[in-house]
Each structure stands twice: as structure tokens, then as C-alpha cells.
Amino acid sequence: MLINCVAYQHGRKLADLPVADISDYVAREDTFVWVALRDATPEELAEMQAEFNLHELAVEDAQRGHQRPKIEEYGDSLFVVVKTVEMKGDELVLGEIDIFVGHNYVLSSRHDNSQGFMGVRARAEREPHLLQHGSGFVLYALMDAAVDRYFPIVEALESELDEIEDLIFTGGSQRNNVERLYDLKRKVTTLRHAVTPLLDTIGKLHGGRVPSMCVDSQAYFRDVHDHLSRINATLDSIRETIGTAIQVNLSLVTLEESEVNKRLAAWAAIFAVLTAFAGIWGMNFKNMPELDWYYGYPMALALMFGTSFILYRRFRRAGWL
Amino acid sequence: MLINCVAYQHGRKLADLPVADISDYVAREDTFVWVALRDATPEELAEMQAEFNLHELAVEDAQRGHQRPKIEEYGDSLFVVVKTVEMKGDELVLGEIDIFVGHNYVLSSRHDNSQGFMGVRARAEREPHLLQHGSGFVLYALMDAAVDRYFPIVEALESELDEIEDLIFTGGSQRNNVERLYDLKRKVTTLRHAVTPLLDTIGKLHGGRVPSMCVDSQAYFRDVHDHLSRINATLDSIRETIGTAIQVNLSLVTLEESEVNKRLAAWAAIFAVLTAFAGIWGMNFKNMPELDWYYGYPMALALMFGTSFILYRRFRRAGWL
Amino acid sequence: MLINCVAYQHGRKLADLPVADISDYVAREDTFVWVALRDATPEELAEMQAEFNLHELAVEDAQRGHQRPKIEEYGDSLFVVVKTVEMKGDELVLGEIDIFVGHNYVLSSRHDNSQGFMGVRARAEREPHLLQHGSGFVLYALMDAAVDRYFPIVEALESELDEIEDLIFTGGSQRNNVERLYDLKRKVTTLRHAVTPLLDTIGKLHGGRVPSMCVDSQAYFRDVHDHLSRINATLDSIRETIGTAIQVNLSLVTLEESEVNKRLAAWAAIFAVLTAFAGIWGMNFKNMPELDWYYGYPMALALMFGTSFILYRRFRRAGWL
Amino acid sequence: MLINCVAYQHGRKLADLPVADISDYVAREDTFVWVALRDATPEELAEMQAEFNLHELAVEDAQRGHQRPKIEEYGDSLFVVVKTVEMKGDELVLGEIDIFVGHNYVLSSRHDNSQGFMGVRARAEREPHLLQHGSGFVLYALMDAAVDRYFPIVEALESELDEIEDLIFTGGSQRNNVERLYDLKRKVTTLRHAVTPLLDTIGKLHGGRVPSMCVDSQAYFRDVHDHLSRINATLDSIRETIGTAIQVNLSLVTLEESEVNKRLAAWAAIFAVLTAFAGIWGMNFKNMPELDWYYGYPMALALMFGTSFILYRRFRRAGWL
Amino acid sequence: MLINCVAYQHGRKLADLPVADISDYVAREDTFVWVALRDATPEELAEMQAEFNLHELAVEDAQRGHQRPKIEEYGDSLFVVVKTVEMKGDELVLGEIDIFVGHNYVLSSRHDNSQGFMGVRARAEREPHLLQHGSGFVLYALMDAAVDRYFPIVEALESELDEIEDLIFTGGSQRNNVERLYDLKRKVTTLRHAVTPLLDTIGKLHGGRVPSMCVDSQAYFRDVHDHLSRINATLDSIRETIGTAIQVNLSLVTLEESEVNKRLAAWAAIFAVLTAFAGIWGMNFKNMPELDWYYGYPMALALMFGTSFILYRRFRRAGWL
């Protein structure tokens, strides 16, 4: 679905264009065209391919979706794929924004993403001195918007981890902890797939040999790079902490088992002694003098419970009970 | 076994050739020859070596099979090995396609692979404007076809993992889970051996100093590279997830053991109390007044089962039962 | 809050400046201005941006805080972020010092850091021959001061680890050990986030192509690099040791459980024998001749305790008791 | 011990030389000398050093043995160390072949290796067109022979792993499995020490700046490189699989323990019920009417075994028995 | 403390110098001065700094000690830190030798090291043709001596590991094994801190752009590099083996626990049967005909022990006893 199709000149909006006029405006020296699509049909993409003269392989990628984030040069144009990430309930939903950038055009096409990037256009139109930098700046603004939306997700994962940690040590439901850790790990892995490949390639847009339309905006791309590095570092440390937390949880489970075993052993010992005494005096030998004593029974009980109590105290002191 | 041997000119089929004529056509400026072999005998390879003037070491590799995927330059020709992967029942079967590429020839030789690459030739012949790019494009088409067949395999591994995960947490047969995880790990390792070495070397075919017959098709080779990266990233995350899943499974087994131990301990305690009481009133002391009480027996039973019930409730509340 | 704003000439203090005069002094050839801010407000930063002509993105970063440590070049000026680390009770508190460096100015702005860097200025003013090196040297002095404050923290972590290790093997509270190890691991991770990114980028300030104001102070920046490497290596080995310690702790818990199990098994066996004998002689068969023997009871007791004692000795020897 | 000392011209054997004549032949333009030593004494090496004018450090290394595999250039000569690997019973035995290569000589000296490289010389003499390439080709032939002998070893390790895997899941002796896995891991480590350093340095002999005597044989050295890569990849995957196998084995042991615990718990429960009933009817209360019933005993037995049977069935269904 | 201060000319000792004359000799073209200090005081270092004109930062490092191993260039002089390692009882003691090297001087200063490097000087003086290479060769000789002393330490660690391995599988004290493995791991970590940073930087002294006084001795520095690589590889494999050994030890402990559990379960079952029988015949029902049989008792005993024996045999066969 076409969302916008606007031509800009000197950083200011010139006109909303019909799709068929795009190629005319793209041919002009001092204007640039910014088109936004959403869940584009193959026909729309084919039309855009014709208007902007896009490379076949890039269009194929945009059609198929489910690409890795990447920045590819086709001659003097760029094809950029950035993953968008949204939380739907407890699930991470990965979408995608595919951006075609030439000297005087930007075509963005997003899939499976509910939020949209209208705010980016609005802000850009409010700041003509920046929009004047042209298509490179628009690319930056779109990437920046997509990447900035990773931060709340990462923070949500961090606080999920904090919560689980508290439960691990205060002794919440361990089965549940393990399941949540596992689930968290999967989310981190998903998010890393959105972040890492982009981090690996975004260096192309600042520093060394930079595509010409991005030269003016290098400092901005470095800023995006920096954000990605921060996210990546945080994901790495969450990932490592999860590993340790799983290990630690196992240690604590084993420890608890060991404590349960000790209590079991202690009580088993106490009752085994009681039962052994009772067994002895329950034997049917004719000649067992103590059975005939008047105070035999209370003395026996005293001996039995006395012994049990001594055992109990010793186990208590040894920390088994 | 020879499958095809065809000469092409300007992207169109010229003629099916007898093997002996190959060297004549290869010598012509504007034609190229595309030969396909299957499970080639040493004699067939020797014949091809003579016709195409192939390098001895490359031919040896093709004969022996079981090579690592690789892209080697011998002077101005290329020798490419790509692994093919097929699912036979529950087993991964690795095959191999060895491709010799010169300026005006492509010789492909496949082993242990049931599917074949006839479709590649058919499609290429339908698109003369692409076939016109020559041998480099044919190389791309073959590699692309082989790599695209990895995707369904990878997806099968991913859904296998999903299934095992469900079983782990819903408490399916844990012994079976471990075995399946182990088996899955092995498959991932096998597949990685097909993917990683190719990923490491395919950079030679786009970007920097590229063999001359591949220069025109660079963007296409980058596309294959991109596919390989995606597969590799997915395999990496499956591999990591398997590791975590094994750990988590161990945690859950230990946890279950710990729970079983608690139940064992609780029931043992309850019955130990019952048995201790019964033991005491089973002693043969003469003077045990309660034995003579009229309601002694029911009171004893009440005391025994009452105590048991109290214990039961306490264990229940503590989550041991 | 503004802390200092001083102009220097030939390494000596010239005058305390009002903020409005900064741009005049910065324009002079042979002076440089060194301004220090603390928990700067957006207004103060905006004022500084105007006076020093700072890059918008750098100022934004300084305003937001919570940056990764980094060294960025904006034209011929530098923007440096260094994390400060303090121990508050048992918690690590990360602060930040943002440093803008130009040819004849240094602007430092610190957040969430209680100690301050007044000592750096005092020492620099006492050593005019060093201060003469200009803004590069001031940058070094600030970074050096921040990095040197990592050392006592790292040592505290090391001795914490030593303490835990002693407890692990002398058999202190294992639950507590695990919790402390986990907590230590988190601190190391936090500290690594302060150290590693800085270590990765500080190479820019010595060795290869170095920003012009830092050329004279290269050996000094290498020294900071060296300190960071030492801290990083120590953190790495703490991290690795923690991993091993968690594993070892698990081994020891399992081992102790196994020992408890053996003792439980041994005592259970001894009492089972006692109880079995007592059970036998407690049976109500009419014709059990030994029950009528005069010494039947003492013989029975002797047999029971004798057997128990033999079992006890054998378990003792096998190391089960 | 001297094994051979032969001069070659145009790829054909010229003469067996006495050691003292070596330096004369080495000085000739169009001949080359190929000497083979075995477990050389210091005196023999000193003699060779004098005849070939070898570098002191290289000779020292050859004397001491136990070097890491390496390829070192001394001026325009090469010193190459390759590890040989043999299976003696169940043990891996590492030997070494040290090769000194100059423009017109090859000196090989092997230690702790029973097989020898006579076959290499024989084959080389049968193929004069290859031997004509000179000393570089001989170096290749020796390295290739040594590396090819790794393959059967690696296959033996692989099938050992397969065997252990079968035992792990069919439930063979787990103690033995662990011991075999550990032993296998050590062998893999040993073999890796032979392979990895060579793999890291063999790139020097093909591709970039290659020593002049190896230029003609570059494709051959790349072939050796390829073999080493394959071996290395296989060793890596064995290593990783061993790690997983140890983990999986632990999981299975824990699982089995958990199953044993369940059975123990189930039987304990059944007998505890039996014993509790028997205990109750073994009490000596005067007034226990059921004791006087005519069918009291069989009813009691029926109740006891009935209850036991019901418990048994329930445990059976729950998979505990 | 000053140990030696000697001037050399053409590889031969010229004179023992008083410290004050050093700067005169250093100024001469064809001599070089070699000074050795031990646990130098700040005053001694200050004196040396003045005589040799050493860089302030290098002297500071030498004063503070506890540096990482490193090789730093200050203009055309070098500052090298090498860790010395000694075994004191069961403890690794790290010392340090700091070496300042200029074109015609070497100043070495060692801390916390009992052995000293007198032998290096003695050997160098005996070999004037080597000493003639000048200060670079002396640097090599000192580094070589320090690095060669790592070998016996590494061998001691290896044989310690071998010993522990034997104990693990023959079933020695497992608690002790874990403790020793942990201790060994710490030693390896300590030693790695001495080796790895030096390995990373020693490449500066051979191969590429080498400081001028080391150019002649490049092959020698490569030899030291090679030794360090060997030590590093050995340490790596010890480290990895320790990790596996800890895992394996845990597996064996769990396995043993599982075996103990099985024996416990088996004996518990046997005695539970015995006790159940005894309990039944100990009941007080009036009408229990078998109690009145003449051979009731022996038949009961026969039944009880017969059943026990059958159980015993079955457990035996199942490997539980």
C-alpha cells in the first residue's frame, strides 16, 4: 500500500506526486523524491522498480522479506534492510523496513510492523536545514528511528532478567525460573539477529570509503553505529548473565536437594532408633526381666524419646535439621 | 555418466555436442560449452580433463569426492566445490557438486545427490539475456540452486528444535529429548560443514579482486553470500539454543528428582510416625495401662491417623506433596 | 553546575573567565581554556555549545548521559566519554565524564560521580611544563585520573573472589557462596562495560593517525592504554575463575550430597538389620524354641548388636561413615 | 643415522653421494641434493650444518626436537617442522620431521617415527617431470605424505566417537563412556597441536609472497592447506561433539538416578503401607475386636495386599515402576 | 641494588664502570654499557634515568612494578617488561625484569626474583662474536633466559594434571581432585598473564618494522616468539583439559551417587520384604493357623530368607549390588 509519495526541493516539500510522475522528478537535478510503502504488493514493487530503475536482486529481496539486516551497494544506489522489533504481549515480533536510496530518491517499504515511520517524515519536514542534506539524511533518520525502538525492548529484557534473578535467590518457583530464562534467551537471540548483522555492516556508512549520498551525514551514521554497539553490548551481557543464571539455578536446585536429603536422613535415623527399641521390647522371649518391672514402660518411653531428642539436637547443631 | 553437453552462443543453445568436439568449441571466441556429469567415472573425468585442459589437482579432488566446499583458482579457471544436502528419512545425506569454470566452459559433476540440476539449465535456457553473461552466470545459477536447497533443511531443523522445546517444558520423555537434541546437534554440525567453508571463500567472487568471468555477476554472487550468511546465522542460533536446551533439560531433571525426593521424604516421615506408634503399643511390657482401656485401640488409631494427617497437611502446604 | 572556567597561557593560569568570554579566548592563538561542569543542565550545555561551537550530536550525547565509553572525532575536535566507577556500600555506581577537546579548549562535564577531578587541575597547574602540551595533555590527565580509580575497585573484586574461594573449600555456606559469585560476576560485567569499549578505541590516540592535539602526548595515552589492558586482563581472569568456581561449587555440593547419601544408606542398613531381627523374634509362632531359653534374650541382643557393630566397622572402613 | 644422500639433475638421479661431497654438488647450478636422516646424532647434524651452511637456530631446533610445527625462513632457505602421528596400540605417538630446504637441496631429518618416507622418494624418482620442479616439490611431497597419514588417525577417532555415542544411548557402562570420551578428547587435543600451527603458517607457501623455490608448486601447497583445513574442521567438530556428549551423558546419568529414586520411592511406599498395617494389628490392646473374628486374618491379609496392589498399579501407571 | 655496570667494546669487556661515568661511555660510538640492578630503589632509578636519559613514563613503570609484560618504544629506545616465574613450594611467584635498551646500552632491573641473570652475562662474555651484535642481542639473551625458565614450570603443571587425571579415574579422593584442579587452573591463569601479553607484542621485534638495534637479531627474537607460542599452546590445552576434567569429575561423582542409590534401594527392598513378613506373623489375630504348626517357624524363616535371597540374586544380576 502506498503511504506517501512526495518531492522535496532545498529541504522543503514541493508536491505530493502521483506514482507515474516519480521518474520525471528523479531525473531533475535539485529535487528528491521520498516514497513510503507498507506491505507492498509485487505489483507496487514492480511499478517502483520501473520508476526508480531499481536492481532486480534488491527488489526480489524486498518482495520475499525475512532478510538479514544489511547494507548493499548496487552501483551508486544503496539497498538497506533494517529489522523492526515490537512487543506483542509477551512475544517479540520482527518486522522489516527495506530502504532503497539513490542520489535523489528514498523508497522505504515496511512489512509486519504496526508503528510506521510517519513521525520521521513529520520531523524531517519541520527541519529543512537537515532535510537539505538529501537522501542520505533521510536514510539516517529512518535507521535511527528503527534502532531507537530497540532500546525499550532491550530494557524490558533487562528488567525481566532482574525479576528472574530475584526469584532465583529468594527461592521462587525454580521450574518457572528455568522456563523464563530459556524464553528470555530466545528473545535475546532473536534481537541479536536484528542487531548484529547491521552493526557489522553499518561501518560502511561512516569512516572509510562512504557512498557519496551519505558523506555529509557520516557523523549521524556513526551515532547510529554507537547506539547499535550499546544495544549489542547489553544483549551480550544479558546473554552471558542468563548462562550464569541457569548454572546458578542448577546449583541451587542441587543444593536444595542436598538439604532435603539431609533432613530425610536425619528424621529417618531418629525414627529408625525409635522403631528398633520398640522392636526389641516387642520380641516374645520368655525371659525379658525389664518387661515385668512396674516402671518398665515409662522408663522405656523415656529412653526412646530421650535418645531421639539427643539425636535431634545433634542433627540440629550440624545444620541437618 | 554424461547428462548433457551443450554449446551456447549469445545466450542461446547452439547444439548438443559429442564429447570429442568439446575442445573445438571451447577454442571459439563467442561460444561457451556447458557439460554436466553425474557420478563420473575416472575415465570420463580423464576425458574431460583432456578436452578442457583441467588442472590435475582439481581433477583428483573431483575424483576422490568428500572435499570441503571451496573455490580455488587455477590460473584463469576456477574449481568450485559445493555440498548438496538432502533429507533421506531422518538422516542428512551430503552430496557434492564439483564445478570447473573457464572463460567459455562450465563443467559440473555431481555425486551422491539424487535431485540434479536440470531445472537450472532449463531456466537458464529460457532467459537468454542472463545466460549471455556466460560461464560466470552459470556458476552462479548452480551455486544458487544448491544453496537454496539448504533452506528447507534448516527449517526442518528449526521446527524439530521447536518440537523438542515444547516437550522439555510440558514434561515429555526426557530421555528421548536428550537423544533428539544430541541428534539435532549432529545434524547442525554436518550442515555447518557444508555452509561455513563456502561462506568463508565466496567473498572471492564479489567485492575485491574477482576472477574475470565472474565480474559481471558480482551482485549475484553477493546474493548467494547473503543467503549463506542467513543460513549460517540460523545454524549458529540453533546450535546455541541446543546447548542451552541441554542445560535446561538437566536442570529440569534435577528439579524433578528433587521433587521426587521431597515426596519420598514426606511419605517416609508419615509412615515412620505410624510405625513408631504401632511399635510402641506392640511392646510386651506388663504394665502398659492404656492397653487395657476399653477405648484404647480406637484412641490409638485416632492418634496415629490424626498425627499422620497433620503431617500430611504440613507437607502439603510446604509444597512437598 | 559550572565548577571552573580558566584560561591558560604557556602552561600558566591566566584568569578565571566568565562563561560569556570563552569564545574570545578560544579564538586566541596561544591560550587555551579549560572548563569543568558537573551534572550540567541542558541550558548550560547549550551555552557551552555556542561558546565552543560544539557538534550537535556530541552535545546530545552529553545531555542524555548513559553513553558507552568512546572517542569520537568531529572534524578537528574530539568528544570523549569515560565511565567513572565508585563503590557505594556493596554496589558499583557508574558515572560518566564527557570531555570535549579542541585545539585550545577542554570542556569536561561529569555526571553521577561524587569524587570530582579537582586534583587533576591542581596537579596540572603545579606542573606548567606538562600543562604547556595543551589540551591533549589535559585530556590525558583526566582520562588517567578516571582510569586509575578503576584499580582499587578491581582489587576489591579480586579480594572478594579470594574470600569466596576460601569459603568454597573450607565448606562455608554454599548457598551464600553461589549468591556472592553471581553478584561478583555482575559487578565484573558492569566494570567490563566501562573498560572494554574504551580499550577498543584508545588506540586512536597513539600509534597510527593521531588527532593533532594529542600527537605530543602519545606516550601518555599509550600508558593509559596499558593500564586499561591490565585491568581488562584482570577482569577476564576474574570472570573465568568465577565460571570455574561455580562449576567447582556444584561439584562439591553434589559430592557432599553423595556423601550424605552414603551415610544415610549405611545407617539405614544397620537399623534395617536390627529391626529385621527384632521382627523375627516378635512373631507369634507357637513353636519358637529360642524364645524359651533362659539366656535367649541376652543372646538375641548380643547377636543384634554384634551384627550391627560388624556392619558399622565395615561401612567405616569403606569410608561411608 | 643417514638413510639416503642423492644428487638429482633434471629430475633424474645422478648419484649416491658421500656426505663430504654434498657441498660441491650444492654449489652446482643445475643439480639438487636430497638427504634423509633418521634420529640424527648431534655430530651428523653438525656435519650437515657445515655442508649445507644451515642456520644455527634451525639446527638447534632440529637437535632438541619437540618443536611446534612451523615454517621459518632463514634468508633464502626454509626450515619446516611437521609432526608425524602414529597409533601405537591405543596411544597416539607424535614424531617429527624437520626439513631444511634451499634452492638446490632438501635435508629431511625424522625423529620418533617408525614409518619413514622412502615411498616419497621412490614415487618422486618415478615421476621425473615433477621432480624437475626441484626442492620446493620435494618439500611438498614430504609434507603431503606426512599430512596424508593424519587421515586414518582422524577416521579412527571419528569411529571411536561413534562407538561411544551408541553406548551412551543404548545404556552401556557409563563410567567407561566418560573415561573413553576423556581419553578421546586428549587425543584430539594432541592431534590438534600437530595440525593447527601448521595450518596457520602454510599460507606462507601459496598465495601471497612465496619463497622462490616454492613458487612453481603453489597449487600443490594449497592442496596440502586444503587437507589440513579438512582435518582441522573434523577435529573441531569431534571436539565439540565430545563436549556435548559429556554433557548428555551427565544428563542421562542424572535421569537414571531420578528413575531409580522413583522406583525406590514407590517400593518404599508399598512396603511402608504393608508394615504399618501389620504394626497396627501387632499392637497389644486388649480390646481389638477384629483380632477375634474368625476370618480376621485372611481379611487383614486381603486388605494389606489389596492396598499394595492398588498402589503398585498407580505407580506403574505414573511410570514410576 | 647495583649488581653490575660494565662497558663493552667489539664484544669484549672494557671495564667495570662507576655509575657516574655511564653517560660518558654511552656517548661513545663503538662501546656499549650493560647495567644490572636488583630491587632498585627510587634513588638508583633516578640516577640511571639521568645517566641514560630514560623516558619518565618507563621509569615510573619500573618503579611501581607489577606491570603487564610489554615492549614499548620511546623514540629510538625500547622499554621491555618480562615476567619471571618461580615455584616457591606449591606457589607460583611472579617477579619481573624491566629492560631499557638503547643503541649502546642495556639496563636491566629485576624485582621479586631470586635466581638472577648472571649466567646470561657470563655466557655472553664467553661468546664475543654474538655479544658484538650489541644491545639487541643482550635484550634477546635476557628475554630468552627468562622465557626458558617458564618451561620447567609448565612441565610441572602438566605432570600435576596427569596425576590428578589418574586419581579421577582410579577413584581417589574426589573432593581433593576438585580442589587440585581448581588450584591448577589458577596457576595456569597466572602463568598465562605472564605469557600472553608478551606473545602479543614480541612480533614487533621480528618480521615487519623492527627497532634498529634489534634488526640483526631478528631470527633470535623469532625463536623466543616460537618458545612463547609453544608455552602458550600447552597452557591452552591444560586449561581446556582442566575444564573437561572438572566436568568429567562431576559426571563420575553423580554416577557414583547413582550407584550408591541403587545399592541403597536394593538393600532397602530386601529388608522391607523381611520386615513385612515378620510384621504379618507378628500380628495378634486369634485365628492364624500357621502360627500353630509345628514347623511353622522354620518354614517362615525359610520363606523369608528364600525370598530375600531371590531378590538379592536378581539385584546382583541387574548390577545394582
Image (cartoon, coloured by chain):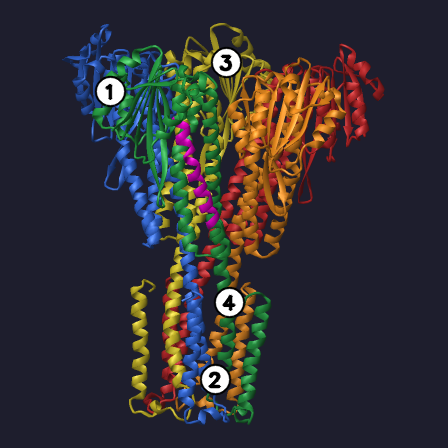
Chain colours: A blue, B yellow, C green, D red, E orange
Please state which amino acid type lies under the numbered disc 1: Pro
Image location (x, y in percent) of residue A116: 20, 27
Q: Which residue is mark 1?
A: C18
> The C terminus of chain B is located in which quarter?
bottom left
Image location (x, y in percent) of residue E297: 51, 87
Q: Are marks 1 and 4 in contact (CB under 8 Å)?
A: no
On what subunit does the disc labeled 2 rest? A
Residue B105's label in the rendered image is 3
- Judge depth for marks 3 and 2 and give the one in front: 2
> The N terminus of chain B is located in which quarter?
top right
Q: Are marks 1 and 3 in contact (CB under 8 Å)?
A: no
Please state which amino acid type lies under the numbered disc 4: Arg
Tell which circle, 1 or 4, labels the residue nearer the N-terminal end.
1
Q: Which residue is mark 2?
A: A280
Magenta residue span: C142-163
Q: Is residue B192 magenta?
A: no
Same subunit, labels 4 and 3: the answer reads no
Q: Is residue C155 magenta?
A: yes
- Judge depth for marks 1 and 3 and give the one in front: 1
Please state which amino acid type lies under the numbered disc 2: Ile
Residue C263's label in the rendered image is 4
The structure residue drawn at horizontal position 47% and vertical position 12%, both measured from the top left corner, is: B213
On what subunit does the disc labeled 1 rest? C
Q: Measure the alpha-carbon separation of dots 4 and 2.
A: 24 Å
Q: Are marks 1 and 2 in contact (CB under 8 Å)?
A: no
Q: Measure the alpha-carbon separation of dots 1 and 4.
A: 80 Å
Please state which amino acid type lies under the numbered disc 3: Tyr
